[in-house]
Image (spheres, rainbow, N blue to C red):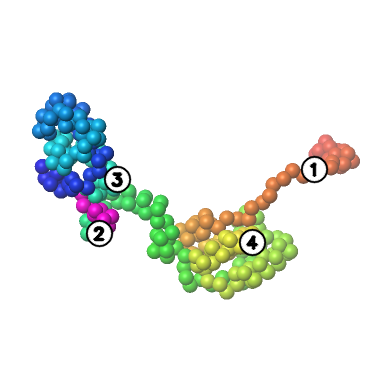
Amino acid sequence: MMWLDNIDIKSLGDRTRILILQRLRERLGYVGAYRALGISDSSLSRYLRAERRIPDEVVRRALQNLGEEEFKQIVQGEERLRAVGIVRKDGSIDYGLALQLIALASGDEYLKQAILRFTVEHFREDLRKMLGLVPTTIKLTWDQGFEEFLRERKKRMKIKSESTMKYYRNLFRKHLEGKTLSQDLIDYVISHPVKWLRNVFRHYIQYLYYTRKISPETYGWIMEIVPSRSYRMDVRPYPIDIEDLRRTMDFLREA
């Protein structure tokens, strides 16, 4: 059994050893199990009750009668990695073996997709930095193009009020003007006490995307992590004047 020659039996814990013997008993029966192991029935009983530690040789004999697939079902996670030598006894990793395993992804579509999903889920920020999702050459500048974008090109609510435009312009020039688009700037905007700054920043990101200065991936990522300003919703009483109601009804009737 070539597969068993590559297993480090010594790395298997006490609980796993008992599970292996239990599986053998289920397959061969109690009598068949202790005979296959070359031990007495009382020894098997003591092993299964954890009264004595199961010796390496007994575990090896059990695995010879179970096979590789049942070994994989019983031994999971880091313990299996220790058993096959990827994780050493001191907890360090055999990087040569680990990299060989990763290299197999080039020819195995399932393994490739599994590695990609795990990377996106657990190393999203590192992946973003590696791929350069945030350009390091873009300086933020309030210019005529951006102002026109806010007035005419922006989707949904365009900025028509001069007072709003002035407020946005002052916020931008005070906190964003001349700064380079970066992760630090994004973190600064997210944590800034003036929540309207988020809106101004998001508008500028839309402008950069509109002018093709950032990629769709960069645009989507920034818009996802930089929240817009939150609005407080409450109930406000509004008095209805009976004369207004009369005029409204007259208008509707005539129309």
Q: Earlier in the sequence, mark 3 or mark 1?
A: 3
Q: Earlier in the sequence, mark 4 or mark 3?
A: 3
Q: Is residue 109 magenta?
A: no
Residues at circles 3 and 1 in contact by the CB criterion of under 8 Å: no
The Cα atoms of the two marked residues, 4 and 3, are separated by 45 Å
* Mark 1 or 2, closer to the camera: 2
Q: Earlier in the sequence, mark 4 or mark 1?
A: 4
Question: What kind of residue is marked 4?
Answer: Pro
From the image, give the main secondary structure of the stretch colored magenta. loop
Residue on which the image places disc 2: 95
Question: SS class of the residue under badge 1?
Answer: loop
Say if 43 sits above or below 201 in the image.
above
Disc 2 residue crowd, few under 14, some 14–19, many 20+, Cα 10 Å? few
Sort mark 3 into few (<14), some (14-19) or many (20+) by Cα contacts within 10 Å. few
Q: Which mark is residue 193?
A: 4
Which residue is at 14% across, 38% downward? 58
Residue 240 in the image, given as x and y percentages of width and height: 84, 41
Q: Residue at image x 72%, y 61%? A: 161
Residues at badges 1 and 2 in contact (C-beta under 8 Å)? no
Which type of secondary structure does the marked residue at label 3 adopt?
helix
Amino acid marked by disc 2: Tyr
The mark found on residue 220 in the picture is: none
Residue 182: image location, x then y, percent: 50, 67
Mark 4 vs mark 1, CA separation in Å: 30 Å
Q: Is residue 85 magenta?
A: yes
Q: Which residue is under mark 1?
A: 237
Q: Which residues are magenta?
A: 84-92
- Tell which tag, 3 or 1, sits nearer the viewer: 3
Which residue carries the number 3 mark? 77
Q: CA distance from mark 2 to mark 3?
A: 17 Å
Q: Quadrant of the C terminus?
A: top right
